[in-house]
Amino acid sequence: MVKISDRLKTVADMCHSGGVVADIGTDHAYLPIYLVSEKIAESAIAMDLRTGPLEKAKKHIKDNNLSDRIQIRLSDGLACLGCGEADTVTICGMGGRLIAKILTKGKEAITPETQIIVSPQSEVGDFRHFLIDNNYAVIKEKMIKDEGKFYFIIECRYQKSVRDKTQYSQAQYEYGWKLLESKDEVLKEYLIKEKDANKSIINHLINNSDNPVIKNRLSELSVKEKVIDDALSYYD
């Protein structure tokens, strides 16, 4: 059985059982192999923009005797996925803006029944803005620490009709309203680390605050500090 990271294991645990999973940017197809091997998915489609990783994915799939249950497809995002062909779509290891772009360009493949699980590794606040602005509901959100790094994992669904137009705060967009409302302990650890790092940078720059560039940077850091404090206030 293929060994996967704690982050991918969390993604796998969030996938609905018994369906077809399309893994976008599959790289070596570790996630699809795990999902099918563990009987979480009936079958899978491993998709990537690059031929190199797909060749390695093909070998790994063959080595695990799953060639009859896992397809590989050369695809730019969701371009080669039919409408409703996958019950679950997973997109991991990319920036939030790129994931948003993939969902926008591939919207014909997404239905309100499609479970979407993403793990943006940057620009997470921007991605949450995208979800609300484009009629996606956040169903569930988890945060994990894997080998010293923190990861957000979001399950969402497209809505034909607008249901959630809540005006969230900047802290809620940056750190996830569901995580904050549940007082997630991993997020709290992350926030404390972010606060300490932010304060360290401020202390390093404060003596050069007459410099216009430094002054502008300090202003940005001050805003970030307030957003972090707003988030930490959920734990009071």
Image (cartoon, rainbow, N blue to C red):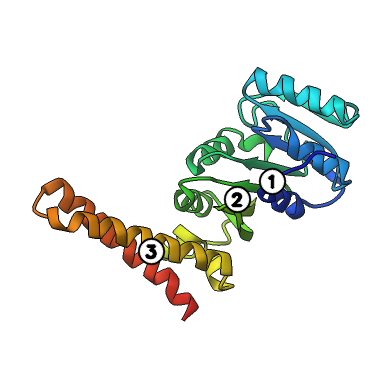
Q: Is residue 61 visible?
A: yes
Query: Is 11 or 147 nearer to us in this picture?
Result: 147
> With respect to residue 225, does 46 lie above or below?
above
Residue 30, horizontal then vertical, whole percent? 74, 36
> What is the distance, in whole Å, between disc 1 and disc 3 at their CAs?
27 Å
Q: Is residue 207 left or right of residue 81?
A: left
Dot 2 corresponds to which residue? 147
Of tags 1 and 2, the one toward the viewer is 2
Residue 137, horizontal then vertical, whole percent? 60, 57
Q: Are the residues flagged by discs 1 and 2 in contact, CB closer than 8 Å?
A: yes
Q: Are the residues flagged by discs 3 and 2 in contact, CB closer than 8 Å?
A: no
Counting residues from the start of the chain, the first of labels 3 and 2 encountered is 2
Quadrant of the image containing the N terminus: top right
Amino acid beneath label 1: Ser
* Element carrying mark 2: loop
Q: Are the residues flagged by discs 1 and 3 in contact, CB closer than 8 Å?
A: no
Q: Residues within 10 Å of mark 2 (few under 14, many from 20)?
A: few
Of tags 3 and 2, the one toward the viewer is 2
The mark found on residue 195 in the picture is 3
> What is the distance, in whole Å, between disc 1 and disc 2 at their CAs?
9 Å
Query: Is 6 or 229 nearer to us in this picture?
Result: 6
Q: Is residue 216 left or right of residue 117?
A: left
Q: Is residue 167 visible?
A: no
* Element carrying mark 3: helix
What count of labels does the image hold?
3
Q: Residue at x 66, y 19 (%)?
A: 52
Q: Residue at x 17, y 49 (%)?
A: 214
Query: Is 133 or 138 nearer to us in this picture?
Result: 138
Counting residues from the start of the chain, the first of labels 1 and 2 encountered is 1
Residue 33, horizontal then vertical, whole percent? 81, 37
* Element carrying mark 1: loop
